[in-house]
Image: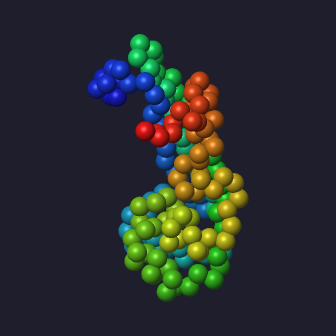
Amino acid sequence: RLRTEDASFDGFVIGGDSMFALGDEILGKPYTAEAATARWHGMRGRTGVLHSGHSVFRLAPGEEPREAFAVAEASVTFAADVDDDEIAAYVASGEPLLVAGAFTVDSLGGAFIERVDGDPSTVVGMSLSTVRGLVRELGGSWTELWNRS
């Protein structure tokens, strides 16, 4: 669609999404307070894996689009002593409702996470080192993405 709307576009289009695996269960966004509360009760003291998928397209005038993609992972361990009042307050904040696994590491939920093994930016939502590698795979450089103007 971008090529149709702006034939002169020369750059990268980056997209991604995440899902959280806890045991054999895949946990996307909970959307409701009830689902988020149930997830937090089940996550206390456990470790799960956040999978973050990345897709980078290289668009250039007169060339066919090229794509590179990868999945990054990070293990997340939750504090065992998160009590019901803390869970209720966290869910009431609204933060966990629209994020994979019902948690964030870079905001209010971060205090309930004891450990992250793997690329920490994966848990924030997009692995910067993975995106850098994909951009390089398509012939670009990370510093091209910096907007300093």
Image position of 41 with respect to 62: above or below: below
Is residue 34 shown left or right of residue 129?
left
When asked about the image quadrant of residue 47, the answer is: bottom right
Counting from the top left corner in percent of width and height, residue 88 is at 45, 81
Is residue 10 shown left or right of residue 137?
left
The C terminus lies in which quarter of the figure? top left
Image position of 68 with respect to 114: above or below: above
When asked about the image quadrant of residue 71, the answer is: top right
Image position of 116 with respect to 92: above or below: above
Is residue 80 shown left or right of residue 16?
right
When asked about the image quadrant of residue 41, the answer is: bottom right
- The number of callouts visible is 0
The N terminus lies in which quarter of the figure? top left
- Residues 84 and 4: in front is 4
Kindly give the residue lying farthest to the right in the view shown. Answer: 117
Q: Residue at x 63, y 83 (%)?
A: 81
Is residue 88 among the parts visible in the rendering? yes
Counting from the top left corner in percent of width and height, residue 8 is at 35, 20
Is residue 23 among the parts visible in the rendering? no
Counting from the top left corner in percent of width and height, residue 70 is at 60, 38
Q: Residue at x 46, y 28 (%)?
A: 11
Q: Residue at x 45, y 16 (%)?
A: 64
